[in-house]
Image (cartoon, rainbow, N blue to C red):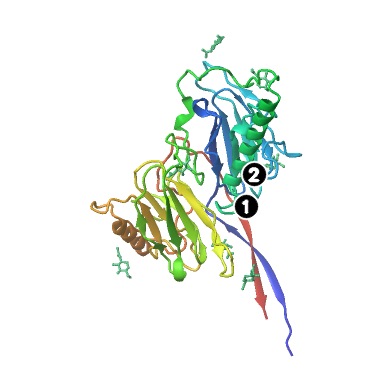
Amino acid sequence: MFSKFYIFSLGLALLPLVSAEIHDVNVGSKGALSFEPEALFAQIGDQVVFHFVTKNHSVTQSSLASPCGLKEGGFDSGFMPVALNQTDNFPTYTITVNDTQPIWAFCNQAANQPSSHCGAGMVFSVNCGADDAPNSFKNFKSSALAIGAKLKETEAASSTSASGDSGGYGGGYGGGYGGSSATGTGSAPQASSTQASGTGKEIKVQVGPNGDLAFNPPHVSAAPGDLVTFTFQQKNHSLVQSTFDAPCSPKDGGFKTDFFAVTGNETTLPSWSLPINDSSPVWIYCRQKVPKSHCNAGMVFAINSDESSPKSFSAFQKVAEDASNSTASGAASTGSNNGAVSSRGLTISFALVIPVLIVSLL
Ligand SMILES: *[C@@H]1O[C@H](CO)[C@@H](O)[C@H](O)[C@H]1NC(C)=O
Ligand SMILES: *[C@@H]1O[C@H](CO)[C@@H](O)[C@H](O)[C@H]1NC(C)=O
Ligand SMILES: *[C@@H]1O[C@H](CO)[C@@H](O)[C@H](O)[C@H]1NC(C)=O
Ligand SMILES: *[C@@H]1O[C@H](CO)[C@@H](O)[C@H](O)[C@H]1NC(C)=O
Ligand SMILES: *[C@@H]1O[C@H](CO)[C@@H](O)[C@H](O)[C@H]1NC(C)=O
Ligand SMILES: *[C@@H]1O[C@H](CO)[C@@H](O)[C@H](O)[C@H]1NC(C)=O
Ligand SMILES: *[C@@H]1O[C@H](CO)[C@@H](O)[C@H](O)[C@H]1NC(C)=O
C-alpha cells in the first residue's frame, strides 16, 4: 500500500534585490507630436514617467480597437501645458505597470478635430505585440493615423467649417530642449534623437535555429534607417542589449525584450524588430538561464561590430563564454548593471520575500 503525506514547510528566502525600473518618456520633444520612445517593454511593478516638454499634451489610456478614445476607467494625465519659455521643471505623470497586458495610450489634444494629435500618430504603448502580431505597435499607430485621415477628409468635405485650431501651444518651441538627456532606464527601447527613417532595408536574423544556442547570421552590418528583425525559431529566448566589456549584463538604458517561447507548433514565429539609428556597434545577448546560461554558451549577437578591431564579434563572444568560468553559472548578477550609473539610474529596489514551498512525498 502506498500512503502519501505532503509536508508543506514555509521557508523564507530573501532574494538579493528585485528592481522595478523607471522608464522615462518624453512627450512632445522638439515640438513633435510624438512620444519618445513611442513603445517600450516593461515588467510588472515598473513605472513609466512621462515628461511633458513642449506644447499642451496629455497621455490618456485607450484601447487597440479605439486608439483615440478614452478607455473606460483608464488613466488620463489631463492636459499638461508647457510655456514656450520653459526649459526645465517640466510637468510629469507616472503610471505603474500592473500586469503584462499591453497598455495603449494617446494624446487627447484636439480630439475629434482634423488637427487631432492622436490622428497625427501621437500614440504610445507598453508591452505591445510583436511586429507581425495583430496587436503590434505598427497596427495601433496605423489605426490612429487612419482616424486622423478620416477627420481631415470630413473637414475637407464640409469645407465651410472653421479654422480647426490645433489647440496645442502655437508656434515652434524656442528654448533649449531640457529633457533630452533622459535616456530611460532598463528595458525601454531607447529614445534617440536620430529617428530611423524607415526608408532603409530590413535585415533578418534567426534566433536559435535548429535548437542551437546561436543567432544566424552571428553578426550583421546595418545602416541608420535599417530595421533588424529577429525571428524566434525554437526554445525560449530573449534579446537584451549589453556592452562589449560585459556581454552578459544588461546595458544601462539598453533595450530588453520579454522571453519568446516557441513550442514548435506555431503557424507564425514570434519576431521583434530593432530600428538602427546610427552606425555604432550594438551588442546583444540572450538572458535565458534555464537550464543553463545561454549567454555563457555563446548566444550573443552584434550589429556593426568592427571585425578588424579588437572589439570584433568573436572577441565579444569569447568574453561571453569566458564569463562562465569566473561567475557561478546561473546565478549571475541580477540587479547590477556592471557598475555603470546612468544619468537617471533611478530604480525602486525592494526585497522580495518568497515563500518556499517544500513538498515532501513520503
Ligand atoms: C516665461 O514668460 C512669462 C510671460 O512672458 C513670464 O511671466 C515668466 O516669468 C517666464 N518664465 C521664465 C522661466 O522665463
Ligand atoms: C495600476 O493600478 C493602480 C492602482 O489600482 C491604478 O491606479 C493604475 O492606473 C494601474 N495602472 C495601469 C497602467 O492601469
Ligand atoms: C490645453 O489644452 C486644453 C484642451 O484643448 C485647453 O482646454 C487648455 O486651455 C489648454 N491650456 C493652455 C494653457 O493652453
Ligand atoms: C533607435 O531608436 C528607436 C526609437 O527611439 C529605439 O526604439 C531603438 O532601440 C533605437 N535603436 C538602437 C539600436 O538603439
Ligand atoms: C521562458 O523562460 C523564462 C525564463 O526562464 C520563464 O520564466 C518562462 O516561463 C519560459 N516560458 C515558457 C513558455 O517556457
Ligand atoms: C502546441 O504543442 C503543445 C505541446 O506539444 C501543446 O500543449 C499546445 O496545445 C500546442 N498548441 C497549439 C496551438 O496547437
Ligand atoms: C573557460 O573554460 C573552458 C572550458 O572549461 C576553457 O577552455 C577556457 O580556457 C576557460 N576560460 C578561462 C578564461 O578560464
Say left or right for 102 vs 215.
Answer: right
Say left or right for 144 vs 272.
Answer: right
The residue positioned farthest toward the bottom in the image shown: 1
Residue named by callout 1: 134
Distance from mark 2 CB to nearest ligand 2 atom below 8 Å:
yes
Nearest to viewer (mark 1 / mark 2)? 1
Sequence-first disc among 1 and 2: 2
Tag 2: residue type?
Ile
Residue nearest the observer in this picture, 33 or 260: 33
What kind of element bears circle 2?
A: strand
The answer to whether residue 19 is seen in the rendering is yes
Say left or right for 330 vs 95.
Answer: left
Residue shown at 69%/69% (left/top)? Answer: 8
Q: How far from the left and from the top, in percent, is residue 298? A: 38, 63
Please tell me how crowded label 2 is: few (under 14), some (14-19), or many (20+) other residues with Cα within 10 Å: many
Residue nearest the observer in this picture, 110 or 176: 110
Image quarter hosting the C terminus = bottom right
Image quarter hosting the N terminus = bottom right
Q: How far from the left and from the top, in percent, is residue 326? A: 36, 61
Residue named by callout 2: 103
Please tell me how crowded label 1 is: few (under 14), some (14-19), or many (20+) other residues with Cα within 10 Å: few
Tag 1: residue type?
Pro
Residue shown at 35%/63% (left/top)? Answer: 321
Q: How many marks?
A: 2
